[in-house]
């Protein structure tokens, strides 16, 4: 395996000159740079990752913080993570997954030299991690929108607009009694940012469109989903439109409606908020507002890399929700 000294000898320069060509820390004449680059290519030299990190004062690692809390949908979370990892590799960075649900883990990451930057998920309305992130030397981006986003970089779907869009769509189809089956109770109780926003959007838009609406937290386990659906139909038997924002519960909601003799979409129209693959995998292809998880993950990396390179220090990007009509909704 070629060494930096081998490259220097082949190019007729010092090892320090080779190092400067690799790091860009000093200006090297074009002829000398070309000789060094030719020697590197001929010898197949690959700088040691640790040496590159020392030369650039970077680890070339992005920390991805995903606390594995109760109630989260791991397959969907992994779509976000996939977007982060794929785009990080395009920026020649690796990803360190941080799954601790405690502040100590974040303190270790920000106080040490483990990562160049952080992408933080499962953001709460009043997130206890924000004070640590704001004083950290590493730039960070939140996948989510806390109550106070001042001075923070955030990226997410516009969940409040998504809730409004679902209510509008059901109203335009002629439904008047509707309900939203939302995230599990423990996720609602944590005031997870996206949950608060989508529930608020739906609840506020419903009366504006003449809808009689309920908003109900929904667990993901089949028996609990059945209980929630049964209670809803018993209390509001005229319910003809459902908005489901719970990927784990969605197939069980459809099954329970069928068992209760309610056909989709003839008796009940169902709108989902979920990734496209989840919408298409159901027993009835879902009319759905797409959750572009991989795209959001990619954007988070682009924002944090821009900050690493001295770009804008605080920005919020909320993606406009898009609803695709399929077989689960029908006009009344």
Image (tube, rainbow, N blue to C red):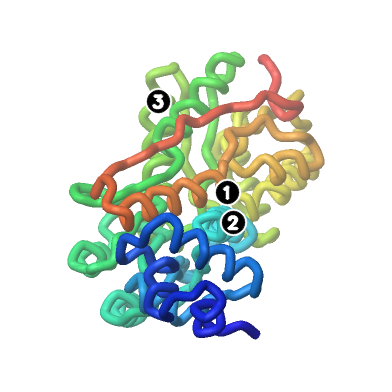
**Residue corresponding to mark 1:** 294
Q: Residue at x 61, y 15 (%)?
A: 173
| Mark 3 crowdedness (10 Å alpha carbons): few <14, some 14-19, many ≥20 | many
Q: Is residue 315 above or below residue 116?
A: above
Find the distance from the CA under tag 1 to the CA under tag 3.
28 Å
Quadrant for the N terminus in the image? bottom right
Query: Is the residue 7 above or below the residue 300 in the image?
Result: below
Q: Residue under label 3, please give it.
A: 205
Q: Is residue 285 visible?
A: yes
User: Under tag 2, what secondary structure?
Assistant: helix
Q: Which mark is residue 86?
A: 2
Q: Is residue 314 above or below residue 161?
A: below
Disc 2 residue crowd, few under 14, some 14–19, many 20+, Cα 10 Å: some
Residue 129 lies left or right of residue 150; in this view the side is right
Residue toward you, 115 or 160: 115
Of badges 3 and 2, the one in the foreground is 2
**Count of numbered badges drawn on the protein:** 3
Q: Nearer the viewer, residue 196 or 148?
A: 148
In this view, the residue in front, 69 or 40, is 40
Residue 206 found in image quarter: top left
Residue 176 appears at what percent x and percent y?
53, 20
Q: CA distance from mark 3 to mark 2?
A: 37 Å
Element type at marker 1? Answer: helix
Contact (CB < 8 A) between labels 2 and 1?
Answer: yes
Q: CA distance from mark 2 to mark 1?
A: 9 Å
The residue lying at 32 percent from left, 54 percent from top is 309
């Amino acid at each position: 395996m070629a060494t930096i000294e081998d490259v220097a000898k082949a190019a007729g320069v010092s090892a320090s000159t080779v190092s400067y060509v690799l790091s860009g820390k000093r200006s090297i004449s074009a002829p000398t740079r070309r000789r060094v680059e030719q020697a590197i290519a001929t010898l197949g030299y690959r700088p040691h990752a640790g040496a590159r990190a020392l030369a650039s004062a970077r680890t070339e690692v992005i920390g991805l913080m995903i606390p594995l809390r109760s109630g989260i949908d791991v397959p969907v979370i992994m779509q976000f993570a996939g977007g982060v990892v794929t785009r990080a590799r395009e920026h020649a960075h690796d990803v360190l997954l941080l799954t601790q649900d405690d502040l100590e883990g974040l303190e270790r990451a920000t106080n040490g030299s483990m990562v160049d930057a952080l992408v933080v998920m499962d953001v709460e309305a009043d997130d206890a991690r924000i004070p640590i992130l704001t004083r950290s030397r590493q730039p960070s981006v939140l996948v989510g929108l806390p109550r106070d986003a001042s001075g923070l970089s955030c990226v997410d779907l516009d969940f409040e607009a998504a809730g409004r869009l679902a209510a509008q769509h059901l109203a335009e189809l002629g439904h008047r009694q509707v309900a939203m089956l939302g995230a599990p109770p423990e996720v609602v109780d944590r005031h997870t940012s996206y949950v608060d926003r989508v529930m608020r959007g739906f609840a506020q838009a419903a009366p504006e469109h003449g809808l009689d609406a309920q908003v109900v937290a929904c667990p993901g386990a089949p028996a609990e989903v059945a209980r929630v659906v049964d209670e809803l139909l018993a209390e509001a038997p005229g319910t003809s439109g459902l908005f489901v924002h719970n990927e784990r519960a969605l197939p069980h909601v459809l099954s329970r409606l069928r068992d209760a003799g309610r056909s989709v979409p003839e008796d009940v129209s169902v709108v989902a908020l979920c990734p496209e693959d989840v919408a298409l995998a159901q027993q009835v292809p879902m009319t759905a507002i797409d959750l572009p998880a991989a795209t959001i993950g990619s954007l988070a990396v682009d924002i944090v890399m821009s900050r690493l390179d001295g770009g804008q220090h605080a920005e919020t990007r909320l993606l406009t929700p898009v609803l695709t009509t399929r077989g689960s909704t029908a006009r009344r």
